[in-house]
Amino acid sequence: MKKDLWWKTGVIYQIYPRSFYDTNNDGIGDLPGIIEKLDYLSWLGIDAIWLSPVNNSPMYDFGYDISDYRGIDPVYGTLKDFEKLIERAGERDIKIIMDLVINHSSHLHPWFIESRSSKKNPKRDWYIWRDGNGDNPPNNWKSAFGGSAWEWDEKTGQYYLHSFLREQPDFNWRNRELKEAVFNDIRFWLDKGVSGFRLDVVNWYIKDEKFRNNPFTIKPFDPEKHKYDRNRPETHEVIKELRNLADSYKDILLVGEVFSLIPGNPGLSASFLGNGEDELHLAFDFSIMYRLWSARRFYRAVKRWYKALPENGWPCNVLSNHDQPRGRSRYMGKDFCDGRARVAAVFLLTLKGTPFLYYGEEIGMRNTRIEKCDIVDPLGKRYWPIYKGRDMARTPMQWSKADYAGFSGTRPWLPVNSDYDKVNVESQKSDRYSILNLYRKLLNLRRKHKALVIGAWEPVIKGRGDVLAYFRTYEKEMIFVALNFSTGRRRVRAGQRGQWRVILSTHRTKFEHFTELDFELLPNEATIIKKIGDL
Ligand code: ISL
Ligand code: CA
């Protein structure tokens, strides 16, 4: 039998390195800090870590602006630390995935410094340079972070393209030499033993060859707005080449961030999986992340996502990341009970598809209130108070009740959430009923039950009465998952007779026995039941 691929069966944990654990008391998380916490991650039961960027960076976008693709930024440690991380993680069967930010580099990358030095420089064409349109930029393309996507460069009298900050010039992916140079940098890390990459804005690599103006439209989410600077068909060619490169190593994962204007665009995300075997292994679809708390909405988002996938494609699911408000805060509204966070956890970890957790999600971390003077995210600085940026979801991991939540011995780069006396790893570890222990049990359960991981997903209650219930089945194993999204009691009738036993529940005792799937769910109850035999 073919061995199941690790990235289909595993759970991937995203670490925002600045905020995980600080070992040298400079207020910023570092690689030795991640190494120190590997035992925790292994106790939790994850299979891989996706590290937000740790390469050298002037940090205009906190690492999403890389100035040396082969180095480790000194604030995080050294290349030796990184090698040690791979080794120590490997000893615990944990894989390391890097963030590959190659739509653009930092403006301080030596390639860009060369490129901007003269029109005749051999690397001029590695970035996207154009003459202005009279006194205006070459066309009407807009940066995702505001303003024109073109920056005037006095020295050579041309504009360069930046889809994000002006400190993040876009690469010219039509240039073969650039492609080779980046591919060699990728090989460098594969040779070091990384198990894959998360590809930043993978759908933006290639831009229209003719640099046509984007159509004018007043609809805020109209994809026409970015007709010519995103999702160009030729991007798939680059991804196919990346896939070939990945396939020349063993068991490598490429997971892409497909960013679309429409809040959740499963068709677009799925298109980057190609035929399921020739482009990315996984692509994020953010539909669920953008949905309001509702069983029906979640159900529809999942159904659309699965339906969009190519025949051999595999889904991945995510509720939080470093760009969005924390899931806990998004779904909870003003409600302070954590029932919803638990339902969300059971939902995420029993769906079909590879789950991605965001650090702190497992202890129920919430958004942190950031005062104006503490904002560091360039987006927050630019748009405050209309949009306060992403800092709220990037604050230090809460390890204990100690000062600064045990994250650092000094004032951290972003404030610690004031709830850290309750929301922290140490207290929750010793509390059997904590959300942390729920996550741990779920991860454990996935290891024991193939049906939960690679089994078919068969919905039974599709949001009616704010309940979501489904079977997960694999060979003879049959598991029933029932989720009550509401704060009222709800009856579940799935009609199945037989011998059933609770294997995990937010409200029931383990081993509770059923002879029929007909029972009442308490408010925000999430229960997993396994068939143990026929009557
Ligand atoms: O973060 C956003 C606004 O809330 C998104 O628009 C974000 O810019 C988009 O998802 C692309 O994100 C990725 O690339 C950016 C980087 O700032 C993000 O952190 C990264 O996830 C530029 O590299
Ligand atoms: Ca540090």
Image (cartoon, helix red, strand yellow):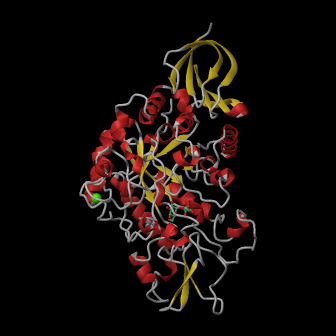
Q: Position of residue 515 (x, y in %)?
A: 62, 11
Work out whether residue 254 or residue 57 is closer to the camera in this orientation and state it.
Answer: 57
Residue drawn 27% across and 55% down? 81
Q: Position of residue 164 (x, y in %)?
A: 54, 71
Q: Is residue 333 above or below residue 59?
A: above
Horizontally, residue 289 falls left or right of residue 226, namely: left
Work out whether residue 15 or residue 256 is closer to the camera in this orientation and state it.
Answer: 15
Work out whether residue 158 or residue 194 is closer to the camera in this orientation and state it.
Answer: 158
Q: Quadrant of residue 340?
A: top right
- Quadrant of the image containing the C terminus: top right
Horizontally, residue 366 falls left or right of residue 232, namely: left
Q: Is residue 262 above or below residue 453?
A: below
Taking the view exactly as shown, the residue that stands out farthest to the top is: 535
Res. 461 visible in picture: yes
Q: Position of residue 168 (x, y in %)?
A: 48, 73
Res. 173 visible in picture: no
Q: Quadrant of residue 487?
A: top right
The mark total stands at: 0
Q: Is residue 110 above or below residue 339?
A: below
Residue drawn 31% across and 51% down? 407
Taking the view exactly as shown, the residue that stands out farthest to the left is: 24
Q: Position of residue 422 (x, y in %)?
A: 39, 41
